[in-house]
Image (cartoon, grey):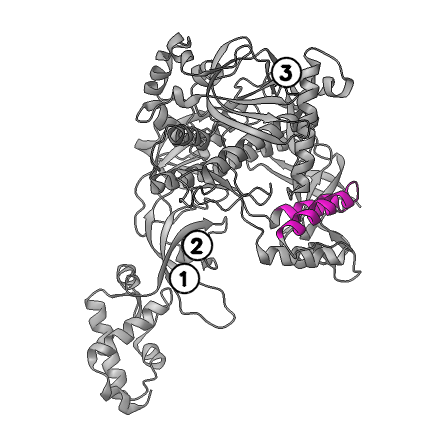
Amino acid sequence: MKKNNLKQKPKSALIGMVIGVFADNPFKNFNYKQVAHRLGISDKPGKDLIMKIVGDLEVSEDIIRVKPGKYIINPKKLRQLANKKQTITGRVDLKKTGKAYVISDEGGDDVFISANNTGHALHGDLVKVLMFPKRKSHKNEGQIVEIVERKKKTFVGILELDKNYGFVIPDSQNMPHDIFIPKEKINGAKNGQKVIATLGDWPEHANNPFGEITDILGYPGDNDVEMNSILAEYNFPLSFPKAVEREADKIDKDIPASEIKKRRDFRNTFTLTIDPWDAKDFDDAISIKKLDDGNHEIGVHIADVSHYVKPGTALENEAYNRATSIYLVDRVIPMLPEKLSNMVCSLRPNEEKLTFSVVFKMNDKAEVLDQWFGKTVINSNHRFTYEEAQEIIENGKGKFSDEVLSLHKLASVLRDKRFAAGSINFNTEEVRFKLDENGKPLETYIKEQKESNHLVEEFMLLANKSVASFIGKPKGGKTPKTFVYRIHDEPNPEKLATFVGFLKKLGYGLNVSSRSELASSYNSLFKKIKGKGEENMIETIAIRTMSKAIYSTENNGHYGLGFDFYSHFTSPIRRYPDLMVHRLLEGYLEGKKSANQDVYEEACKHSSDMEKMAAEAERASIKYKQVEFLEDKVGKVFPGLISGVSKWGIFVELKESHSEGLIRFNELKGDYYYLDEDNYRIIGKQYGHVYRLGDDVNVKVKKVDLLKRQLDFELMD
C-alpha cells in the first residue's frame, strides 16, 4: 500500500483491516509492526496509527495480549466474524492425532482442521467452520468456531485413579482426549475398571473435558464387560426401559377370532421357515400351493409387527430410537423386547401367527402372473435350518422335500434372471466363531452361502421389489405417494475410473458404457478372478468403489441389485424401516392419502445412521474376538493375504482366522519401502521388491493388544 492510500482509508475501515489480519491467521500472534507490514504500511504516521488501533482493540477485547507487544484474535470475536464470513456446517471426523476433517452438509470436499483449530469439538459433532482463504495447491482448511450439536456425551474407557482425581482413558480411537474426573464424581469406581463417563463442563482453557462416572461395567477382559463396552461406546442401550417391558408384557399372544376373520387365511396352506440354527426371531415364512391350472401360488408372509406396535406407545418410541437389532458375536440386542421378537411376532412352527403378505401367482418359468398384498394369518408347518434345507436340495429327499425342491427350482430361475438383468454378484464373507461357555473363541470360520440361503433370499428380494414397485410406479399420471425405499446409488465416478485404470494394469477390464454393461462386466470379472491370487484384492477394491445403501423417500433405485424400485418389507422384527413400510402399505391399501414426506425422510435418515452404527458395533465385536483368538498365539507363524496398504505399513489378513494386523514400515527388513497408493502396493527403494494388495505372505504374530483390538505382525518371507 502506498503512503497516500492511508489518507483514503477512514479509521473505521482500517480497524476492520487490522482485525482481518488477526482473523485470517487465528493462531498466529503479531505485533503492530507485523500488522502494518501485512497491510503494506511502511511510513511512521501509518505505523503509529496501527499501534493506536492495536491498543484500542486490546482494550475492547477484540484481540488478546499473549506476550509483551504480541497479540492474537479473541476466540469470541472470531465467532462473531464467522457469522459474517464464509462458513460451512458439517460433521467432525476426528483422528487419533487430534487433527480432523469436517464433512460439509452442503457436499463438496472435506475441510481440513489442524489439531490446534478443533476447539473443543469431538468426533461426530455438528460444527460451524470458518473457512480460511483458499491458497493455490492447498486443500480446504478452516477452524471450528462453534459446536452446533454435540453428537456424543458418554464414553467408555478405563479409569486411572490418583489420590484426589481420576482420568478415563477412552477406548475409542476417535477420542484423543482423556476425561478428567473430580474425586466427588468417581462414584465408587475402582482403578483399572471399565466405566462409562458422561461429559460435563469443558472450561475454555482446559486441555481435558470434565466428566462423571455414570456406570461401572467391570474389569477389562471379561466377555460380558467387553461386549457391553462396545454397545455403550456406540450409545446402544444395554436393556429396555421398564415402561417398554410393561407394555410388551400386556400384549396377548392369543389371536381373537374377530381378528382372524378380517384376514386372508393361509393356516391350511403348506408354509415353512428357513433360518440359521440359532435363530430365535423368525420374520419371514414362505407358503407354496399347486394351483389347478398348473401354476404355483407362492406366499411371502412377514410378521405383522405393526399390529402390535402402535404409534405413540413406549414400544414404538423405543423401536424408533433403536431402529435396528444389533448382532454381536455372542448375542443379539433386539429392536423389540423378547416377548414380541421371540414369541408373539416370531413365526414359530405350529402356532397361529398374524402376518402381512405378498402372494404371487407364478408359472414354472418363475414369471409373476398376478400378485396380491394384504393382511393374513398363517400356521407354519415346519421350521428348517439352512443346513437341513440344503441337505434336501443336495440329496433330493427328506421331510417336505417336494415343497422345498419346488421352491428351490423357482428361486434358482429368479436368481438367474436377476443376474441376467443386471444384478451384481458380490461375494461378501461373514466371519463366525465357535465360543466356549465363557465366550472365548475356540475356532473361526466363514459363513458359507449355499442354495438354501439363496432360496430364501430370492423370494424376499422379489417381495421387497414388488411392494416398492406397487407403490412407487406412477399410475395414471399421478405422483406416487410417500414411501420408504432402500436405495443404492451408482459408483463414485472418480473411484470407478481409478479402479478401471488399476484393472488394466492387471490385464482385466470393465465396460463402463452403460449401467447394464458395467453390471455384466462386474459379474464377468468376478468369474475370471475366482480362485486366483488377485481375487481378494480385486473384490475388496470393487466393493470400495460402491456407494452405501441407505433409506430414503426419494426413489433412486438399487444399483447393486439392478432394481428400479426396492424397499425393505421383510424384516420388521429387526428393522424399523420395514415397520414404516408395513404401515404405509396398509394405509394406501385402505385408500388413505399420501403421508408427510418430511416426517418419513427424517425417520429414513435416522434409520440409516443407526444401521451404520450397528454395523460398526458388530465389526468391533468381531475384531475383538479375532484379536482374542490370537492372544495365546504370539510367536506363531500363519499364512495370510495383504489386505491393505497405507502410510503406516501393510495390513495382512490371516487366512485361517481372518484376523487383520499391521506390519509397520520401520519393521520391514532389508530395504526402505515407500507407498505407491494408486497401485495399492509398496516398493523397496533399493532393490525394487514389491508387495501389493492380495499378495500371499507368511507372518508371525508379534504383539496382541486386546484392549485396543490391535495386532502387530512380522513379515517372514
User: Depth-wise, is mark 3 or mark 2 nearer the camera?
Assistant: 3
Tell me the residue that label 2 is attached to: 102
Mark number displayed over residue 142: 1
Disc 1 marks a residue whose amino acid type is: Gly
- Residue 706 point in image, percent of width and height: 58, 33
Which numbered disc, 1 or 2, marks the residue that appears first in the sequence? 2
Left or right position of 8 against 590: left
Does the magenta portion include 526?
Answer: yes
Q: Please, what secondary structure does the residue beneath circle 1 have?
A: strand
Q: Residues within 10 Å of mark 1 (few under 14, many from 20)?
A: many
Does the magenta portion include 50?
Answer: no
User: Depth-wise, is mark 3 or mark 1 nearer the camera?
Assistant: 3
Which numbered disc, 3 or 2, marks the residue that appears first in the sequence? 2
Q: CA distance from mark 1 to mark 2?
A: 9 Å
- Identity of the residue drawn at 42% across and 19% down: 337
The answer to whether 9 is drawn above or below residue 17 in the figure is: below
Disc 3 marks a residue whose amino acid type is: Phe
Residue 78 in which image quadrant: bottom left
Q: Please, what secondary structure does the residue beneath circle 2 have?
A: strand
The answer to whether 292 is drawn above or below residue 702 in the figure is: above
Q: Magenta stretch?
A: 515-543
Tell me the residue that label 3 is attached to: 384
Residue 210 is at least partly visible in this image: no
Q: Are marks 1 and 2 in contact (CB under 8 Å)?
A: yes
Depth check: give the residue in front, 711 or 393.
393
- Residue 94 point in image, percent of width and height: 46, 49
Q: Where does the N terminus fall, quadrant-wise?
A: bottom left
Give the main secondary structure, helix, strand or loop, of the magenta stretch. helix
Residue 70 in which image quadrant: bottom left
